[in-house]
Image: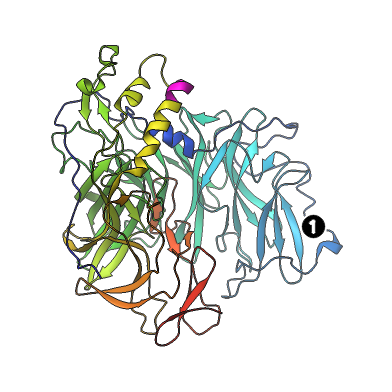
Amino acid sequence: MPAPVPHRPKAPSAGIVVLCTAICACEPERAADDARREDGDASPTDTSITFPDAGVIDAPGLDALDAPEDDAATPTRAFAFDLDRDGTNDTHLALLDGAGGAALRVETATDAFEIPLGATARATPGGVTFSGPALQAIGDHVGGARSEVAVAFAIDRGKNASAALAVLDVEARLLVASTSSPADLARFESYGLATFVGALEEPARRAPFLAPGYGDAPAALWGYACVFRVGATSSRCGAGFVEIDTRSDGNWFREVGGLTSDLDGDGTGDLTLVYHTRLRSYSGRTGLLLADTEYDVALADEPSSPRWFHSGRNYGTLSFARGADGLDRTLIVGGAPVGSFADYNCNVSRFVAVLEQARAMPSTRHLAWSDYFGFASSIFRTYSPAYASDPSADLARLGDFTNGCIHRFADSRVVVSSEEAVMFDSFVASGTVDTCLDEQYALYLPPTWTPEKTAAWNACISRIVSQPGTWGMQVRRVRDGMSLTGSLNTYVWGATDRLLPSRELVFVVESMPSGARFDVSDVPASAMHVWALVDGLWAARGDLPIVGRPRILTTPASGDVGVGSFADPTALDLTDVDGDGLSELALASGARVEWSGSAFVVVP
């Protein structure tokens, strides 16, 4: 097996000043961002029954919530929710579209019914993208033996759709409160309407919220979040919600997500929203701003590069943790999920960084360290027709393309040699590559972003995935960024302590030859290794008995783990099918392997 060696790809620094705004979008990744969004207006429908912008829904048909007697049948789906809070799942919940609008379908062992959300409610609308869970059991807020349920959905307003959140009392079969995005807000600049939904942890229950998502900015403003609280009221959120002002000073731009962690140590989760260049955190009790932390993850590594050339992108995962040394930290891994070999933008901006604060004092939060690995494409000074024939003469910073690409699994946190650490895969490119400067520069010369120019750019830059290089693994200590170990010619797909009886943390690792393409299309899948890290060195624990890469699942970000971009954390597909206390590992082929006591074997 390869000997671990610390290594790090460094991006070249052009050392040329650029004329650009703080939230600079002078690179074509903005178009790639657009492609990640789900745009489009909702189809016009009958809007004779209008949905209120906020408050309790009062629409025809909501007083007839009891299901017909013959609908109280044996559930047709597996239970996934524990509404009576006894530790056993007892209810199936589903959000369904119907002729009368969307409704929450509730099924138990003895009953089945639906709670309507209104004639203009939609479960699967066009023009709205949610980051976060559509259905949540949130504990008891109004009294009763069963938890209330929070539902994220959309309102069809005819020419556009609005994001919406409702809280339902399943026991009484009543809608308790609802809120939505502003009725006339159809999209953010060139981005479709996106929203962030989740819940703040409270003692014995959770408080659901609805917050603006990607693209919220002064040019197309939403600007506030709504957190559910019985007895509260807000002019914009409506009855049953506390309003939080999510605007920032100056020229600001919202990412899609955030995280919900107890930053101030008061026992209630706080809401952290992610923006270009900054994190803003709000008290879960008062809704007041706890911290507004601006940071530049590239400045320490590239002081001569144009300031904010990366636009302060916070794509990737964010994790909040209380360190053993008494400090609270937020780890940010600006990378793409493992297996994203076709993503030539590779998260656009690639970095690892840690924000640090005194315990329970979010106002002291600051950038403790960062390591910048690269930016996908090139940055120019002026985009002037004078340089159309030679864009290199207007170059401020050459793109890194695939060099410095980071791939992450889960939220990248591991413990290595008793140290809290971050582990990730990175790519060091080698050889020459077409930088596509002519095609990129042409995009910004009038007429800008024409279909022909866009097609030419995409055709050129998509070939970047053929760039040769070497994949490797790195481990950094969370508290100071120090390199703990690393290895070349390896690609870590994930980690688990559920494969071996010892419960040792092991890693599923693929050997990767040097000089292979970035997209590894020239690397046939091999048998995966199962290795542990012992004193910073790989230690073999076995190889899988068949060839094939592991099956990777997308897991929702929640609680102390959040996202700033549209890609959620990942996980290995692990299931204890035979009930022996150990998990079987699924491969992409569908086969499963398990530990037999002396080796890994294929599950019959």
The answer to whether residue 1 is above or below residue 407 is below
Q: Is residue 506 visible?
A: no
Q: Position of residue 88 (x, y in %)?
A: 59, 75
Q: Quadrant of the N terminus?
A: bottom left
Q: Work out whether residue 337 or residue 264 is closer to the camera in this orientation and state it.
A: 337
What is the chief secondary structure element of the magenta stretch? helix
Q: Quadrant of residue 5?
A: bottom left
The picture places residue 533, in percent across and down from the top left corner, at 26, 73
Tell me which residue sits at (38%, 69%) in the image. 528
**Amino acid under label 1?**
Asp
Q: Is residue 104 magenta?
A: no
Image side of residue 421 versus residue 158, left or right = left
Q: Which residue lies under the disc numbered 1? A: 66
Which residues lie in the magenta part? 450-454
- Identify the residue at image location x=55%, y=50%: 231
Q: Position of residue 191 (x, y in %)?
A: 48, 32
Rendered location of residue 502, percent (x, y):
36, 84
User: What is the quadrant of the C terminus in the image?
Assistant: bottom right
In the displayed structure, would residue 463 be above or below residue 424?
Answer: above
Q: Is residue 83 above or below residue 196?
A: below
